[in-house]
Amino acid sequence: MDLFQALRERRSCRNYDSRPVEPEKIQQILEAGGWAPSVMNKQPWRFIVIQNQNIKEHIKFSCEETLNYMHQVSGWKWLGKYPLDYLMDAPVLIAVIANPKDTGAEQFLPDRGEGYAFSCCAAIQNMLLAAHGLGLASLWFSLYEKDKVREIIGISPEMDLVSMIVLGYAAGEVPNVPRKPVAELTTVVE
């Protein structure tokens, strides 16, 4: 698959079938994450592959509590109707974690020190594209409270849960969503 085709066609999926993901595909996706650029080549990411249904159920329950809280404080109606069943349906969740101490020189600038997280985000994007290239569906998932999910997974306190990936085979067609024209989002300074 052409890189630019993958960039245009990869979409976030929220409807998975129960077919397991082959271990070799999971390994290829993790390796793709490991080839991402990182601040000062620190490669701060660590990956936790979650396939245990009991742990996924605890994560889903915690995320539903978080979603209910966000619905109450925001007043956003869609949050009250947003189902998280895909957390159980997808056979794999991947937690991407890192130690905030593994950041770059930007940590010495005022209000900075997030290079480790930016590096993890590059790894996540690589993993999402690799999943798409392997015929899998994925979702960059962020609707959770870090401390609660960190405890469920057993992540040590010095590590930051940067984000999670939901991974599996799509149950049906993944909807195409429109994109804003890049020209509307770009300013050129000459």
Image (cartoon, rainbow, N blue to C red):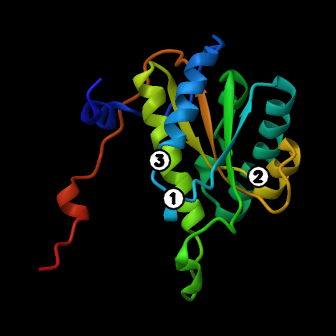
**Residue 52 horizontal side relative to residue 43, left or right:** right
Q: Position of residue 74 (x, y in %)?
A: 65, 63
Q: Position of residue 159 (x, y in %)?
A: 77, 58
Task: Tell me, yes or no, whether the two marked residues, 1 and 3, touch with CB atoms within 8 Å.
Answer: no
Q: Position of residue 43 (x, y in %)?
A: 57, 53
User: Badge 1: few (under 14), some or many (20 or more) residues near its Cα, within 10 Å?
Assistant: few
Q: Amino acid at mark 3?
A: Ala
Of labels 1 and 3, the one closer to you: 1
Which quadrant, please, contains the C terminus?
A: bottom left
User: Badge 3: few (under 14), some or many (20 or more) residues near its Cα, within 10 Å?
Assistant: some
Q: Residue beneath label 3, please?
A: 36
- The mark found on residue 66 in the picture is 2
Q: Is residue 168 visible?
A: no
Q: Is residue 149 visible?
A: yes
Closer to the camera, 126 or 148?
Answer: 126
Quarter of the rendering containing residue 11: top left
Q: Residue beneath label 1, please?
A: 41
Q: Gap in Å between the C-alphas at discs 2 and 3?
A: 30 Å
Task: Tell me, yes or no, whether the two marked residues, 2 and 3, touch with CB atoms within 8 Å.
Answer: no
Quarter of the rendering containing residue 146: bottom right
Q: Position of residue 63 (x, y in %)?
A: 76, 45
Label 3's element?
loop
Mark 2 vs mark 3: which is more N-terminal?
A: 3
